[in-house]
Image: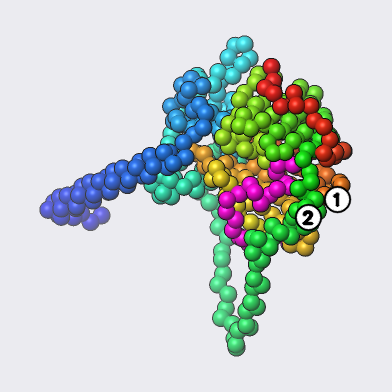
Amino acid sequence: MRCFPTKNRSLRILESTVTILAVVAALALILKRSDARASTNEKAVAPSGPTVEQGNKNIKVLTGMPEYQLIPTMKFFTVSLGVSCTYCHVMSKDGKMDTAADDKETKRIARGMIKMVLEANATTFHNEPQISCYTCHRGQAVVPKFSNFPVALKTMSPPAAGPQPTATATPALPTADEILSKYAAAIGGQAAIARIKSAVITGTVENASGSTGTFEADQVAPDKGYDSVTTQRGTRVRIVNEPRGWEKNAYGVNELSGQQLEDLKLSLALFGNLNLREQFSKFEVAAKEKINNRDVYVLNATRADQKREHLYFDSESGLLLRRVADTSTMIGIIPEQIDFEDYRAVDDVKLPGTVRFAAVDTQNPTSTRKIDKVEFNVPVDDSLFTKPN
């Protein structure tokens, strides 16, 4: 083995030291600027309602996150790693989960991983949540360190002989206004939609977890909604009476506000599907794709509260086939998807007969509603929209 002279070795050490100090200084500057941008973003979009550390014990990393995002975030972790809650949390002697305990090493490691994701999104992606736990884990608790062998070879195509065929021009996409106008006409027209002042919708529900039951959704324009689902596991009631809203389940009554309240309102057919154009401040035609072998136009839409959705319209019929809503959190973007099928006419207005909800949830990833009966412009008891006891 060949050795370098002492003088050269000392010079190399000095050069390495200078390089390391320069990198540290650069990182410090980047973090400072990122903190400033994060501070600006926090001021621009302040969380509505309490934060996670105000309602939970021993929160060390997710401080500042809105309380209502905590459970969806925990579910996102379990899906990303393909584990259950007890992978990080311990069960107490009485059979309840002790979420504040730090007994498990996996929980302490998780905090370090969350910090890594937060720092990468802040420094590399300028405070845009572009990466998350799922980016690397892909449903596995342990990320593979190496590629599987043998690695597949990628061969280069030989140069083509003769003149190349002329590329076919890509057909121009319709405008957002054209897509939305076609959708309004497809479900009955704006005049028919405007005549609807109330709706009572009932049917059955089937969850991926195995539970089944019934639901009722009552709505009165412009701002009252009642949604009740009853299965073998009990009844969950959600109420919109703007500017307030509530959810009642087996754990009690919780008040809803901000994005939670808007999400609930738009999940109801009268508010969500009929007056689609009014829900967003910005539309952008993104692409032409396929859903179940049907061509669809994709609209990227931004709500007034800055939440983003992706709307998929059948290019032939004009009907809305899918909505994907992105919830931006500290640890990444959590999507929720709603699919609409089996459209049918009720009093000259078309509504989907089957609505399928898909969420990032290992315990109940999908919930399907089958609509049995729809009644428009019928009296609705006003007491339904009061805060539940």
Which residue appears at 66% of the width and 66% of the height? 174
* SS for dot 1: loop
Residue nearest the viewer, comparing 5 with 386: 386
Residue type of the residue flagged with mark 2: Gly
Image vertical order of residue 195 relative to residue 256, above or below:
below
Which residue appears at 62% of the width and 23% of the height? 254
Which residue appears at 50% of the width and 48% of the height? 130
> Can see residue 135?
yes
For disc 2, the marked residue is 189
Residue type of the residue flagged with mark 1: Asp
- Magenta stretch in the rendered image: 270-296
For disc 1, the marked residue is 348
Asked if the residue at tag 2 contacts the one at tag 1, i.e. Cβ–Cβ closer than 8 Å, the answer is: yes
Is tag 1's residue or tag 2's residue first in the polypeptide sequence? Answer: 2
User: Residue 294 lies in magenta, yes or no?
Assistant: yes
Which residue appears at 82% of the width and 49% of the height? 349
